[in-house]
Image (cartoon, grey):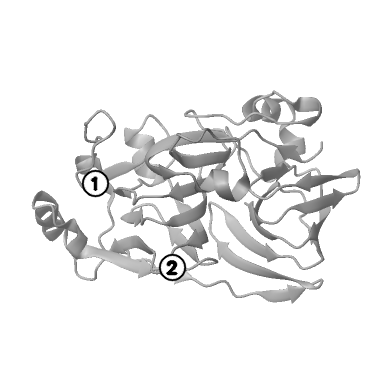
Amino acid sequence: MKPLKFKPIFMERIWGGDTLKRKYNFDIPENKKIGEMWCLSDNTTAVSVIDDGEYAGIKINELTKKFYREIYGDKHNYERFPLLIKLIDAHDKLSVQVHPDDEYAYKYENGDSGKTEMWYIIDAKPGAKLICGLKKGTTKEEFKKLLEHERLEECLNEIEVNPGDVVYIPSGMVHAIGDGILICEIQQNSDLTYRVYDYNRVDTSGRKRQLHVKKALDVIDFNLRGDKIVPDFRNIDGSRISEVLRTKYFSIDIFEIDTCINIIKEGIFNTLTVIDNPCKLKYKEGEINIKAGETILIPAQIDEFYLEGNSKIIRAYI
């Protein structure tokens, strides 16, 4: 089983732009406002398709059924691929929103999983901001009152971010991405989003987008506030690695490669998302070139691999 590449899935969004086309040279029409590129997905909304090699044209869920142990190994049991990886171009600010946890989603969303996620800031304009939770002391009653009077910004916890920062967004945390930010998002395999506030925007047809205030109020943790994580790197093999997040849903490492790095992963799948500059992945049976903006899946069957280049890469695994 070789490493797997996937065809990009582009999603138009009211707040999208053209950064993905300009930065990564994706084949996107000039007039499309692309807010998200789903790099790897086995979600019911959209399923990734293998882009090359002997399995080209096959959906990821079909391949994992046929080669379950080769891809996943023996340590977990998954009904679907457990992660969803995106690139997000926030040309305009996103809605203020929240995601449910597993328990709530299972009960009220037809057995779906909840959604915990992380953001890696690829690029950000000077002074760019994110919303991560609520100001200390905000109560449910105060939140509802501010929402009714369209003054919700008064209770939102804003943080300023720079390229290279990481932000962890657990389920239950109110959050939003500000304008002028390019993000790599790695999350649970869920597309559940409860919009609570959308700045009274309208779409091209003059309609406001649907809000989900009742469900949002059910799942918001009013004590949650987040902050950015500035990765702490250590040198390894002449390059640098930061073991930036360890959660039950995913683990995240960031590689800054100067020449090469050797990874031994012991029977678990890995995903690699190349953020800047192409690189080459070598493994026992061969090698593969990875462009900036691409995500690949390294099956559990491959225990060791090398990365060569001068690249910045996000590694995700469970």
Q: Under tag 2, what secondary structure?
A: loop
Q: Is residue 229 left or right of residue 24?
A: left
Q: Splitting the image into 4 quarters, where does residue 155 fall?
A: bottom left
Q: Splitting the image into 4 quarters, where does residue 138 fall?
A: bottom left
Q: Is residue 108 left or right of residue 213?
A: right
Q: Which residue is mark 2?
A: 161
Q: Is residue 131 left or right of residue 66?
A: left
164 above or below 302? Answer: below
Badge 1 amino acid: Val
Image coordinates for residue 88, horizontal then vertical, percent: 48, 48
Image coordinates for residue 156, horizontal then vertical, percent: 25, 62
Camera-side residue of 302 and 240: 240
Mark positioned earlier in the residue sequence (2 or 1): 2
Q: Which residue is mark 1?
A: 196
Q: Under tag 1, what secondary structure?
A: strand
Camera-side residue of 199 and 188: 199
Spatial CA distance of label 2 from label 1 is 23 Å
Image coordinates for residue 289, horizontal then vertical, percent: 79, 46
Is residue 86 visible from the viewing direction of this image?
A: no
Image coordinates for residue 179, horizontal then vertical, percent: 37, 55
Badge 1 density bin: few <14, some 14–19, many ≥20, Cα 10 Å: many
Q: Please identify the quadrant where the N terminus is shown.
A: top right
